[in-house]
Amino acid sequence: AKAQGRNRQQFYAQQIGDAVSQRLALERDLRAAVAAMDFELHYQPKLRVDGGLAGFEALLRWRRPGHGPVSPALFIPLAEQTGLIDAIGTWVVQQACAQMAAWRDAGLGEVPVAVNMSTSQLRDPGLVAWLAGVRQAHGIADGQLEMEVTESMMMDDPEQAILSLEALRQQGIHLAIDDFGTGYSSMGYLKRIPVHTLKLDRVFVAQVDSDARDADICAGMIALAHQLGLDVVAEGVETDAQRAALAARGCDVFQGYLFARPLPVAEATRYLLACAPT
Ligand code: C2E
Ligand code: CA
Ligand code: CA
Ligand code: CA
């Protein structure tokens, strides 16, 4: 029995060792990717009730050499822990603005693009001035660049976060609360957070057509948002039944695989060409 216990200990030690070295290898590869800025942005369309394009959400893609695509849900937290997120976040904003300018210059119109912001970006006291510079360099008009923040990003210093968001809003950045309903922010903060848009998380969307309680929750959140003067975007809309159930409850904008996956630039451009009035 003693020997068995020792074997088991060795087994667990081995497993922990493997996990640590895998994490280190991932971190090493992520550092190399950041040094080479070996990332792509994909663009997922957001559609209004009438079917018109409301804009794109830019989503980060990393193809890890020897492994294939790695989910940002996996590498963004690592980037946050290691400080790599600052360089990544800078690149994402620059890349998105450059792409908006490229589409505009190609005659495809001014397409709003939303980027996901990280906590450390929101805390950066130089963010507002820096963003103004990037937008000016690319000639991005007010309201065209959107930033998505989560409720949990506000939590460790809500007063500071509200001030930062206020400054961004005054600078013409369109703001959205991402994953709404999954964080811990209180209703009291909601009325003070100076955002334009609320994004309903897909946990509520998934069964909006089949579960009466989820349908009521969505209806309530949409009504609350409208009361506060906010637009509502539903995330993760995969079926027409979900779309119809959300539309019946007043949802303004839809995003999800039902309409399109996040698209590489060439495909997003084709998408724009197809919806541009001829
Ligand atoms: P998110 O901001 O909530 O992004 C929406 C996620 O839902 C994306 O996953 C998108 O591909 C996925 N999605 C879209 N439509 C559907 C659908 O109909 N069904 C399902 N099941 N999923 C759908 P993705 O691209 O893997 O990104 C995961 C998360 O990584 C994002 O969640 C966001 O929190 C983070 N992320 C992505 N890009 C960036 C970035 O540039 N910066 C930062 N800080 N975070 C990012
Ligand atoms: Ca988002
Ligand atoms: Ca989301
Ligand atoms: Ca999410």
Image (spheres, rainbow, N blue to C red):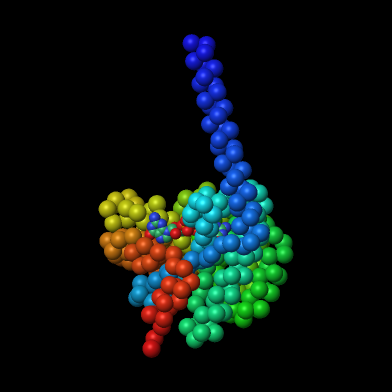
Q: Quadrant of residue 270?
A: bottom left
Task: Give the quadrant of the C terminus.
Answer: bottom left
The residue at 62%/65% (across/down) is 91
The residue at the far top in this view is 1
Q: Is residue 54 visible?
A: no
Q: Which residue occupies the foreground of this view, 226 or 93?
A: 93
Residue 79 image point, x, y percent: 61, 52
Quick check: 80 above or below 24?
below
Q: Which residue occupies the foreground of this view, 270 or 97?
A: 270
The residue at 40%/64% (across/down) is 261
Residue 94 image point, x, y percent: 62, 70
Residue 158 image point, x, y percent: 63, 54
Q: Quadrant of residue 122?
A: bottom right
Q: Which residue occupies the foreground of this view, 107 or 120?
A: 107
The residue at 49%/77% (across/down) is 111
The residue at the far bottom in this view is 278
